[in-house]
Amino acid sequence: MAVVLFVGRVRPRVALVANARPAGRGAPTPDRITREITHVFLQKKLLQKLGPGLMHAFIFWGFIVLLPTIAEAAVAIVDKDSSLPILGDASWFAFVSDVFATLVVVGVAMAFFIRKVLKPDRFRGSHMEEADRILLLILAIVVTFLLWNASRIGFGIAEVPDARPVAHLLSNLFSSGEGTEFAERVLVWAHLLVILGFLVFLPGSKHLHIATAPANVWLAKDGPTGRLEPNRIDLELPEEDIRFGVATQKDLSRKQMLDLFSCTECGRCQEVCPAWATGKPLSPKLLIMDLRDRVVAEAAGEVELQPLVPNAVTDQVVWDCVTCGACVRECPVDIEHVDTIVDLRRNLVMAESRFPQEAAPMLRGVESQENPWGQPASARLDWAKDLDVRVLKEGDPAPEVLFWVGCAGAFDERAQKTTQSVARLLAAAGIDSAVLGPREKCTGDPARRMGHEYLFQMLAEQNVETLNGAGVTKIVASCAHCFNTLANEYPDYGGTYEVVHHTQLLSELIAAGRLQPRTGDGKITYHDACYLGRHNGEFDAPREVIGGEIEEMPRNRERSFCCGAGGARMWMEEESPRINDTRFEEAAATGAETVATACPYCLVMLDDAAKGKSSDIRVADVATLLAESTAIDPR
Ligand code: SF4
Ligand code: SF4
């Protein structure tokens, strides 16, 4: 009966995932196998928080080890003197199951301590009562298991008492006498009935993640998290065949649907989200929970099928995201919030023309002038007026390295300093480099993160045509967003190059002795840009370029806190408290005189925060600091 009930309850969820749009990610890859071992079996991501990680690991490993004991109990129900073949007679298995059952009890006790005594804020909004019920069911399963084995030892049914130290200890509760067999029967039945009750309860609870999480981890994105899944727009197709992001649950991919049924409501994502931390309505946890609840209610016919925005989540929630990826990195079951948020934005922008109006000039600028600043292409070289920079013309031989300047680097006054510094340093190191000048167009990153996939697609195709036509093989980018797009997203559009960030190239040149900086002036802190660090794993190169001692902020490297500019948020209004102010305060608290960055977006946002606070702390790119401390020809 329990199995029938379980199947009946789980079937609608299985159907939702099975009928969703294929994710195209099922094939085994080394990354997938590694993730299953590290994220699922070894609980690596959970153990980043040692206490809660151990708590979960005890319960999870106990669950794995104790699986065969369900069959053991089922056999014993039929005949108390029979046991499972092989495992039933193995004293090592008796020992292991006894120890792990005890560890599960410890894990459940730790879970209650964390939830009821420590009460971390990350649980705000989670279904706490449901979690309590689940924990009590788990506790009942292992306690009845231990007591059942204790009764078998106490009544002399089990022959290897020493192999079960904890059950042996508890066996003092039971002694031979009249009615003893009845007590043993009650315990084994109680044990099995609690397990079957748990099975029935499972499909409607967040604990379904014990079944969905391994599949979700398997389907997670291989490679850098900075790459978004393309949503190809082919205008030749009939309109009904073109998908503009995600409007309703029918547009979700299998991975996106599975994400919804894998969330454990642990709140680790919420805890690190800069939007949530600064009081915005967006919480990545609540986003996933709200989408799940809507999808389930629609599937059950409780509510009509409607667009997910604003019926499951509000427009503001969708626009609050800076695509920093902190949530994805923390999530123990590899839920991909950013891809889903961008997919929801795609529909709002391309199908509904619904987006924060303050971002409209940016989109217009990209559409008409191919840059978010709306400047003419002829102004792309203004930064190079006093420099001897080679501009790659059609038919010219390809340089050793193409310097991708980026729109911020070309048009923003503060970022232009970085561009000039990089150009000088490349020349000083004797690198054969060139820029595209007026032929360079926005990579499309802000349009894409904003949801305008079609605009991004056009720019990507045009830039790839230019780069391939010029025979470019290696690119250095001084913007973390350009770097991410060129390296991770242009291969989807036929542009495959060796792409390095300027800090990577500069650190190599320093190591090779081709640049000789003088280091050690003043206290410096370094802000890790999300699209260089967390999304692409580069933490060391910028620190090597800085060279001297760095006053690290509490949130650094993979746990860095966003500057607030990603996800096209640079072009949107933000209510106070602002993310850039919060980050700048953290930087200032280190006592540093200089905040170093390696991305023009971060430079602008942190510099704005410094100016807003009338601070005399300097914000500068690491390339500018390096150029100042290196003996180079000013031309
Ligand atoms: S990407 Fe960053 S801002 Fe967006 S939901 Fe995740 S943590 Fe929050
Ligand atoms: S999305 Fe991931 S990190 Fe966030 S609450 Fe769910 S399981 Fe936890």
Image (cartoon, rainbow, N blue to C red):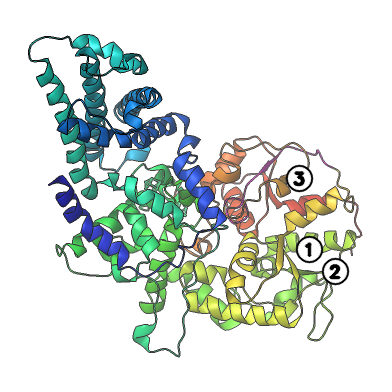
Q: Taking 145 as reference, is 279 above or below it?
A: below
Label 1: which secondary element:
helix
Q: Taking 334 as reference, is 406 above or below it?
A: below
Mark 2 surroundings within 10 Å by alpha-carbon count, few (fewer than 14), some (14 through 19), many (20 or more): few
Q: Is residue 242 magenta?
A: no
Indicate which disc residue 4 carries: none
Q: In the picture, residue 182 is in which quadrant?
A: top left
Q: In the picture, residue 61 is in which quadrant?
A: top left
608 lies left or right of 630: left
Q: Quadrant of the C terminus?
A: bottom right
Which residue is painted at 39% across and 54% down in the image? 215
Please identify the dominant SS of the magenta region.
Answer: loop
Which residue is painted at 38% across and 61% down in the image? 256
Mark pair 1, 3: CA separation: 20 Å
1 or 3: tag closer to the N-terminus: 1
Indicate which disc residue 544 carries: 3
Can residue 634 be seen in this snapshot? no
Indicate which disc residue 387 carries: 2
Tell me where the magenta segment starts and ends, as one range. Answer: 519-534
User: In the image, residue 439 lies at what x, y percent?
Assistant: 71, 81
Q: Which residue corresponds to mark 1?
A: 420
Can residue 242 be seen in this snapshot? yes
Which residue is painted at 83% across and 73% down in the image? 399
Label 3: which secondary element:
helix
